[in-house]
Image: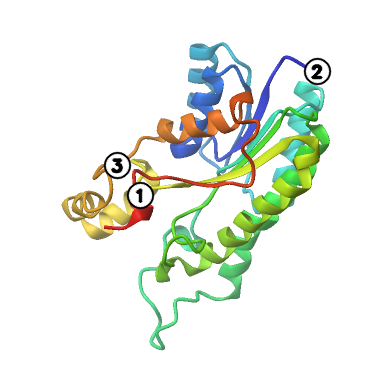
Amino acid sequence: MSHSKTALVTGGTRGIGYGIAEELASAGYDLVLGYQKNQERAQEAKGHLEGAYKVRVFLVGGTTEEEATVDAYFSCIDENFGGKLTALVHNAGGYWGGIASGKPDDNGSWFQGWEAYEYYQGMYPKCFIRLVEKAVTRMEDERGYIVTVSSPGCNNNQSPHLNYIMPGISKSSMEYLVRHYAKQLAPRRITCNVIIPGFAKTEAWDPMIERMGADRMDGFVKSYGMKRWSSPREYGGVVAFLCSEKAAFVTGVTLPVDGGFHLGK
């Protein structure tokens, strides 16, 4: 059994993904980090992680809904880590047109069309299947960890959010896949879990803050649970735990990490 540890984190150079990357690096993981197009930010992330934690970091650009990007991730792993992978974290996400749907159409429908549907299917369940099917061929038995990131309202633990129908459909499918792979991979003692973040103080929330106004948004956050924003590293700490031997008996779990948001007001 190898003593080195390698993790692939999609969307790993900013926001929650970077918080995850930093916590994994602090736990001794070498990293392959996916990013979409902000190469300057990706290089900054790489430099900080390598300098602060003395780990190896490789960057792979491209959109996760493209099969070629997934192929590039694993080419990087094969070339630089001998085809060995310990942890897979699918964190990358985005919005069709760059922002969440703001209102329904004249008929009251929130459905944004089939092109948007295919965009989200490609980014979440299709990408997750591609990632997992390739990852598990590079993982050792009893030493493999898979984590993905969903959103509130994508399972029956919370009421659905009407304006989130398009990504929500796709993330619901991904949550099913987590349970499927957890069961499939249990005999190999490879775990598969999903976290559901709450209000994370990242730039991903900037369009919503701009739309609502900062004071109104802060008031909304403070009306739930612990009444505060979270930091990316709070999610990273949970993911690092799930990608450790301490969580070797935890699999098929959907874990809210939201300061009580899922409990309602």
Residue 157 in percent (x, y) is at: 46, 60
- CA gap, disc 2 and disc 1: 42 Å
Residue 192 rendering spot, x and y as whole percentages: 66, 42
Dot label at residue 229:
3
Residue drawn at 55 percent across, 76 percent down: 113
Picture coordinates of residue 261 (x, y %)?
34, 51
In the rendered structure, find residue 205 and report the number of the disc placed on it: 1
| Whether residue 41 can be seen here | no
Disc ID at residue 1 = 2
Residue 171's spot in the image, x, y percent?
56, 58
Circle 3 crowding by C-alpha within 10 Å: few under 14, some 14–19, many from 20: some
Q: CA distance from mark 3 to mark 2?
A: 40 Å
Q: Nearer the viewer, residue 59 or 144?
A: 144
SS of the residue at dot 2?
Answer: loop
Is residue 101 toward the left or the right of residue 172 in the image? left
Residue at left offset 27%, top offset 59%? 211
